[in-house]
């Protein structure tokens, strides 16, 4: 659960955070994940990119439009 405090400490909005609608990108050959910066790869998920399906499409489309190699497939995070 993420809490966003706006203005007065009495005004608090709670935004649920769940992995249900999130995806990661993984290279099926190397088993490495897309780095959270959006470029490069990382082993494990500590520094791996995670986002919604719409964000995943946008980052993939951007890389493809720039003629960058895109070896990744979308996978669900553990616990999703």
Image (cartoon, rainbow, N blue to C red):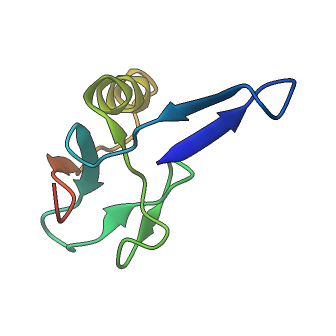
Q: Which residue is more in the foreground, 1 or 30?
A: 1
Q: Would you say 53 lies left or right of 14 here?
A: left
Q: Residue at x 46, y 26 (%)?
A: 66
Q: Which residue is more in the foreground, 49 or 11?
A: 11
Percent x, y of residue 59: 41, 31
Q: Which residue is more in the foreground, 4 or 77?
A: 4
Farthest residue toward the right? 8
Q: Residue at x 14, y 69 (%)?
A: 29
Q: Residue at x 27, y 51 (%)?
A: 25
Q: Which residue is more in the foreground, 37 or 1?
A: 1
Q: Residue at x 33, y 44 (%)?
A: 69
Farthest residue toward the front? 10
Percent x, y of residue 47: 49, 68
Callout count: 0
Q: Is residue 45 above or below residue 75?
A: below
Farthest residue toward the bottom? 43
Q: Is residue 69 above or below residue 42?
A: above
Percent x, y of residue 44: 35, 78
Q: Quadrant of the C terminus?
A: bottom left
């Amino acid at each position: 659960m993420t809490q966003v405090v706006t203005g007065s400490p009495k005004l608090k909005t709670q935004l649920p955070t769940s992995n249900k609608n999130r995806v990661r990108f993984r290279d099926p050959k190397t088993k490495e994940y897309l780095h959270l910066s959006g470029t490069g790869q990382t082993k494990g998920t500590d520094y791996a990119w995670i986002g919604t399906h719409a964000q995943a499409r946008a980052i993939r489309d951007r890389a493809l439009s720039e003629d960058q190699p895109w070896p990744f497939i979308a996978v669900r995070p553990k616990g999703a």
